[in-house]
Image (cartoon, rainbow, N blue to C red):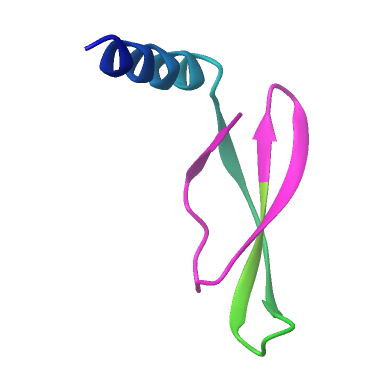
Amino acid sequence: MKTLIAIALLTLSLNANAATAYWTGQMQYVQTVTYSQGVNCQYNLHGQTFWRTFISTFCPSSVEVY
């Protein structure tokens, strides 16, 4: 029982530190080193922008940042 409570508290504490970044509309189609098609997507988190690469053809509208 104590183990389950500890796992539940750990899971909740990890989610509490997450922030949501939103897609800026900027994207670039890329080819990965394994020759898969991918897309670089730019996101904004509190005024700071960063890029994430996905093996996909579209950008998710938001991502969780820890």
Where 64 sits versus 3, above or below? Answer: below
Q: Horizontal placement of 39 versus 8: left or right?
A: right
Where 58 sits versus 65, above or below? Answer: below
Q: Nearer the viewer, residue 36 or 59?
A: 36
Residue 57: horizontal and vertical position, in percent?
Answer: 50, 73
Residue in the image at 49% along x and 66% along y: 58
Q: In terms of image quadrants, where is residue 48?
A: top right
Q: Nearer the viewer, residue 23 or 63?
A: 63
Where 6 sits versus 58, above or below? Answer: above
Quick one: quadrant of the N terminus?
A: top left
Residue 28: horizontal and vertical position, in percent?
Answer: 70, 69
Residue in the image at 36% along x and 20% along y: 7
Outermost residue toward the left in this view: 1
Quick one: quadrant of the C terminus?
A: top right
Q: In terms of image quadrants, where is residue 34?
A: bottom right
Q: In terms of image quadrants, where is residue 26?
A: bottom right
In the rendered structure, does residue 64 fall within the stretch colored magenta?
A: yes
Residue 10: horizontal and vertical position, in percent?
Answer: 44, 17
Q: Horizontal placement of 43 versus 16: left or right?
A: right
Q: How many marks?
A: 0
Residue 32: horizontal and vertical position, in percent?
Answer: 70, 80
Q: Nearer the viewer, residue 46 or 25?
A: 46
Residue in the image at 76% along x and 43% along y: 50
Q: Which segment is the magenta one?
A: 43-66
Q: Horizontal placement of 40 versus 58: left or right?
A: right
Where 40 sits versus 60, above or below? Answer: below
Q: Horizontal placement of 23 versus 27: left or right?
A: left
